[in-house]
Amino acid sequence: MDSSASAPITTGTVALTVANLDASLAFYQQRVGLRLHRRDGGAAFLGAGGPDLLRLAEKRGARKAPRTAGLYHFALLLPTR
């Protein structure tokens, strides 16, 4: 058996482009419960006390590309929630 098959799979920070950084921050902080780790210009990094889980980058007027599904979903599985 290949030992890599039993190795845990991890992901890095999820990066999203948003049209309104302040509104997106409010959503992820108030509704999802993430904490703001730092804000750097037009980007913000959020998490749950450990490493960054989410990076939001503002692009004013950003829209989904035509004829694409966009982001289907991403999940954050936290041990205490």
Image (cartoon, rainbow, N blue to C red):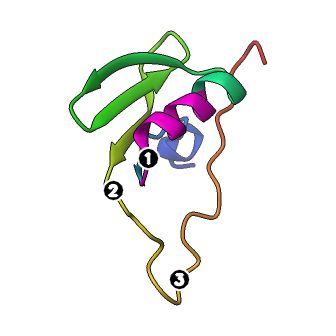
- Report the disc number at residue 33: none
Q: Which of 67 and 3 is in front in this view?
A: 67
- Is residue 12 in view from this perspective? no
Mark 1: few, some, or many residues within 10 Å (few <14, many ≥20)?
Answer: some
Q: Which residue type does callout 2 highlight?
A: Arg
Q: Which of marks 1 and 3 is in front?
A: 1
The numbered mark, 3 or 2, whose residue comes first in the sequence reads 2
Q: Where the C terminus falls, by quadrant?
A: top right
Q: Where is residue 68 in the image (x, y as percent from the top left)?
A: 53, 83
- Is residue 37 in view from this perspective? yes
Is residue 11 toward the left or the right of residue 73 in the image? left
Q: Where is residue 49 in the image (x, y as percent from the top left)?
A: 51, 9
Q: Are marks 1 and 2 in contact (CB under 8 Å)?
A: yes
Which residue shows up at 33% across the image and 56% down it?
60
Q: Position of residue 6 (x, y in %)?
A: 59, 39
Residue highlighted by disc 2: 60
Label 2 sits on a secondary structure element that is loop
Residue highlighted by disc 1: 20
Residue highlighted by disc 3: 68
Residue range highlighted in magenta:
19-28
Determine if the magenta segment contains residue 20: yes
Mark 3: few, some, or many residues within 10 Å (few <14, many ≥20)?
Answer: few
Q: Vertically, is 43 above or below 18?
A: above
Label 1 sits on a secondary structure element that is loop
Determine if the magenta segment contains residue 53: no
**How far separated are the C-alphas under marks 1 and 2?**
6 Å
Q: Main secondary structure of the magenta part?
A: helix
Q: Which residue type does callout 3 highlight?
A: Thr
